[in-house]
Structure formats: structure tokens, C-alpha cells
Image (spheres, rainbow, N blue to C red):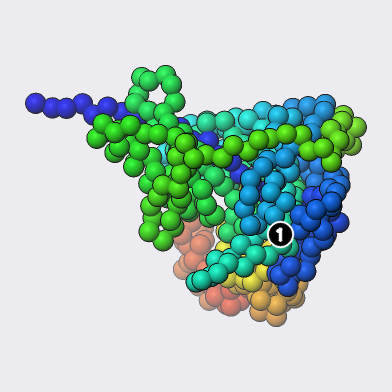
Amino acid sequence: MSFVMPKYIVTIGLEVHAQLTTRSKMFCGCAVAYGEEPNTLTCPTCLGLPGALPVLNEAAIEKTILTGLMLGCSIPPVVKWDRKNYFYPDMPKNYQITQFDLPLCLEGGVPLYDLAYPKDAQKSIANPGKIVQLTRIHLEEDVAKSTHHDKFTTIDFNRAGTPLMEIVSEPDLASAEEAFAYLTSLRQILVYGGVSDADMEKGQMRCDVNISVRPEGQEQLGAKIELKNLNSMSAVRRAIKFESERQIDCLERGEKLIQSTRRWDDDRGETTLMRTKEDAHDYRYFPDPDLLPLRTPDIVARVRPLVPELPHEKRSRFESEYGCSAYDAGVLASDKQLAAWYEAAVGADPAVPAKKVANWVINDLLGALKDTEGGLAACAVQPAQLSALAAAVEAGKISNSQAKEVFAEMMASGAEPAAIIKSKGFEQVSDSGALEAIVDQILAANPDKVAEVKGGNDKAMNWFTGQAMKASQGKANPKMVTEIVRRKVLG
Ligand code: ZN
Ligand code: MN
């Protein structure tokens, strides 16, 4: 007797909060900065003191609209801000200013690219080229930062009022791996647009996950269960894996899942119940009477020219324009600075094949940067210098293995490749007079081998090349030596 296990469909939606790279806060002139003395970057507005009035931050609105344009969203002609009412010590005015029914961006999508998946999942991507549909993007303010100690809690209001963009996806993701790829791809685009640094490990991007499970064949989504407090890429992946398996186990046991919010415990690797729907907040949203609705068409017209070439566009251009493989193009375009560095190196000398430059950047430069503090920005080697090194190999001036040695020295000292080649004595002897003298000597000393070459023995020809290389301590240009031997012996 055998049982057929019922299959389950996992459906995931993500709500991502990303801090914008503005200089000042969302509704006041206080600076946005990290690591400052606590509670020094504050004013009556961001402290929520009675009577203080908010003023919209134009740069934050522009950056959110730019995000929307990069992600193919539509921008409603009129938007507004609303009060979301709740009390929590990190929000002393008792409401958060956010956007309820007229957000800045609607719909759009995030294209997932192969290299954005976790490394161990890149070989088995269920849905290559998937575009995750978005519901909306709205612009709101961050709350203060609470730090819980043993017997008390401290609150730092430097973060209160920081512009926060909330990117809400449709329940359009099917696995922990897709969620991981979504966050990686999204981050890349935000960084490309200069709208957010979006580093989860630094708290610049935070993520809530909605996850539901239903038996295959059931049309309606299962109960929506929300996971809070996910603040690293690995936590997102592990939490989704744990929670979807937990929900499937519940259904297997015949239990009913109910809409609820759960907390992820990263140390224990499990989720625990925070609250069910019955004790959910009623936020009593209403339009903020201190802020007028905003017309967007003029801002959209101003921002549209700022939309950069996006990662997926750069990838396909690198393939078509430079002949990069899909993998190489993916690596190069994954980082805006790296892509610019590569293009500068390619542009430095059009005679060096762009594909060869890509090899140097991906295999050698990135490899060396792993052990270098400060990454590409602090790199001792300039694009034109790498191009010059690749050109020396192309021209047959130095061998590949010599070039690797030169490169290591370039990374260490920042010296010009030509100078290092010279100081290491790698310069190949391409002076035909000097090479002829070497060849003449060898020919005179080995009449039997000369006879073999005359008899059509290619091996003997190679032997002469080898001897000449030896006699020149490896500096002879092998191609030239072969030509000279051929000319002198065969005429
Ligand atoms: Zn302030
Ligand atoms: Mn929010």
C-alpha cells in the first residue's frame, strides 16, 4: 500500500523598507547620519512635540519617484500622506506619517537575474527571467531606534523621521531562493539609481515576509502569516524555509492555519507567535491635515531623465557590445562601480579584446580585491594600467604567467606595468639582430638537428625554439625565434 503525499504551494510576498540617501529627514531639516551621539539630530518635529509642523522633503519624493520609474511603476498624478495611528515609545506623536490610498508608485516589477540567487541554487532556477510584480511603493518616516537592555530600554531619535521607502510586492514569490534573488536584484537597482545603499546587514534595508501555504489544486490563498524582524539576507532565506515547512506540517496534521504575525528568532532558527488577527491594530488612517496633497507630473518630468541604464540593460549590452559571456556580463553589471571600471579599461585601448579585459577583471582583479580593504574604490590598479598589462600579453611582450606576476606587483605597489616588466627583466627580446645571433650559435653547434629540420621534422624545429628560449633566459620572443630558424634553415 502506498500513500500519495499531497503537494503544497508556497506563496510569498515581501514588504521591504529601504532608507533613502537624503541629507535631511522626511518632514524636518534635521540631518540624516549614523553613528552620531544619540538624540543629537533632533528637533520638535521629529521628536513629535505638540504643535510642530511637518514639511515634505522634495529630494525624498524625487528618489522614490526615480525608484518607481526604474521599476516600471505608474506614478499617480496626485498623491497624499496619511496618519497611521498607534502608540509605541519610538513614535511619541502617536501616529506615523505614511501613505495609505494614494501612494507615489503603483504596480511595476523587479526582474530577477540568475546570479542574484543564492550560489547553491543558481543551477536549479525554477523560473529563469522571472519578473516579480509589485503592488506599490510609498514614502513614509522611520521611527526612533530602541535598544533593549536587561531592565530598561533606551531610545535614539536620530533615526526618527528618516525617509523610508516601502516597496510592497504582490504575493508573487514561490520560494526562499526567489525571495533571496528578489532582495539582491532590488538592492542592485536601488544602488544603481543612487536612491538607497540598501545594505540589509547595516539596517538600511529591512524586510517583512508574508507567507502562506495551500494544497495544490486549491484556488484560494492559504492564511496569510507575517514574519517580522528579518534583518539579514540569510535570515530571510532561513525564516521562509522554516516557516513554510512549519505551515505544511500543520496542514499535514489537519490543523487550521490562522492569519497571524510571527517573530523570527535568528539564534534559535525558528518563528514564534506574536499576535493573531483578533488583536491586530486598527490604525484609523486619515489624511494628514498638516500636509496638502501633491501633484506629481512636474516632478516626474524632472526625474525621468535621471533613470540610469539598469542592471539587466547593462548585462545585455556587455554581451552584445563586448562579446562577454552571460556569466561575465552578470558579474560585471552586478556592481555599478565595477561596470564603470571595466568600461574604462576597455576604452583605454581598443586594440585589446574586451573579452580578455573581462577575464582580467573577473578572475584577477576581483580575486585580489577579496583580500583588499576598501574594495574597488581603494584599488591601487587603475583601469588604463590593467589595459596596458593585457596589451603587453596580446602583443607577445610577456607571457601569461609573467603577466600574473606583474599584476600581483601592480596590486601591491600601484606601479606602471611597463616599469614592473622592465624591473623583473620580463621584457621579451624582440630585437631581431640579437635573436639572430642566438639562433646562429645554436644552429652551428647542432648540425644533426639542422638536418632533421630540413627533413621536415617539426619537433626539431620546436627543439630549436626551446634552446633559443633557454639561451635568452626565457626572454626571447618565441614566435620570432621560430620564424628566424625557419628562414635560416629552410630558406
Ligand atoms: Zn527634526
Ligand atoms: Mn511601513
Q: How many labels does the image show?
A: 1
Residue 346: give x, y in percent of width and height: 74, 52
Residue 486 versus residue 371: which sits nearer the camera?
A: 371
Residue 210, image x and y in percent?
50, 38
**Ligand 1 within 8 angstroms of badge 1 C-beta:** no
Asked whether residue 282 appears in the rendered view, the answer is yes
* Outermost residue to the left: 1
Q: Is residue 197 visible?
A: no
Residue 415 drawn at (x, y percent): 74, 75
What residue type is disc 1 on?
Answer: Arg
Image spot of residue 278 (x, y percent): 47, 36
Q: Which residue is drawn at 87% across and 30% down?
A: 295
**Quick check: 216 left or right of 233?**
left
- Residue 53 lies, with reference to residue 247, above or below; the image says below
User: Within 10 angstroms of label 1, few (less than 14), some, or many (20 or more) residues?
Assistant: many
Up-down relation of residue 374 to residue 145 (above or below): below
301 lies left or right of 425:
right
User: In the image, what residue occupies the spot 58% across and 78% down?
Assistant: 473
Q: Relative to residue 200, is residue 412 depicted above or below?
A: below
Quarter of the image with the C terminus in it: bottom right
Residue closest to the far bottom = 423
Secondary structure of the residue carrying numbered label 1: loop
Quadrant in the picture for residue 420: bottom right
The front one of 310 and 32 is: 32
- Quarter of the image that includes the N terminus: top left
Reading the image, the residue beneath label 1 is 159
Left or right of 366 in this view: 71? right
Residue closest to the eye, 104 or 149? 149
The residue drawn where x is 64% and y is 71% is: 373
